[in-house]
Amino acid sequence: MPIRAQYSGSVFRYPEEGEDLREFIQSGVELIGEDGAEADAEVVALGTRGLMEMGLMMELIIRFQSVG
């Protein structure tokens, strides 16, 4: 049975020399236990829906990459 999860929370980056510690919000969705184009489409659709509901669709950039 596949596992579907979403997360959102504060992330901190180590500062470059002369900068302050930087905080930003990172969100994501995961689908574990399924593969293929339909699973990929489900994850993209879920992420897009979340961004739309937060009013961030105008700033949307989706990047795809393959590990294998």
Image: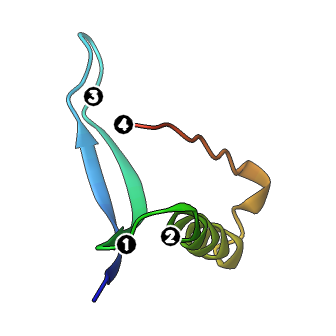
Q: Marks 3 and 4, how far apart in space?
A: 37 Å
Which residue corresponds to the image point at 66% horizontal and 76% vertical from the top-left?
49
Residue 38 in the image: x percent, y percent?
57, 70
Answer with the quarter of the image where residue 53 lies. bottom right
Q: Which amino acid does label 3 sit on?
A: Asp
Give the mark, 3 or 1, whose residue is nearer the N terminus.
3
Residue 68 is marked as 4
- Please tell me whether mark 3 or mark 1 is closer to you in this view: 1
Residue 14 in the image: x percent, y percent?
20, 29
Q: What residue type is labelled 2?
A: Ala
Residue 39 is marked as 2
- Please tell me whether mark 3 or mark 2 is closer to you in this view: 2
Q: Callout 3: helix, strand or loop?
A: loop
The crowding category of the residue bearing disc 1, from other C-alpha atoms within 10 Å (few below 14, some 14 to 19, many at least 20), is few
Q: Mark 1 points at which residue?
A: 34
Give the mark, 1 or 4, whose residue is nearer the N terminus.
1
Q: Marks 3 and 1, how far apart in space?
A: 41 Å
The single residue placed furthest to the right in the displayed view is 58
Quadrant of the frame with the N terminus: bottom left
Q: Name the residue under label 3.
A: 20
Report if the CB atoms under discs 3 and 1 are less than 8 Å apart.
Answer: no
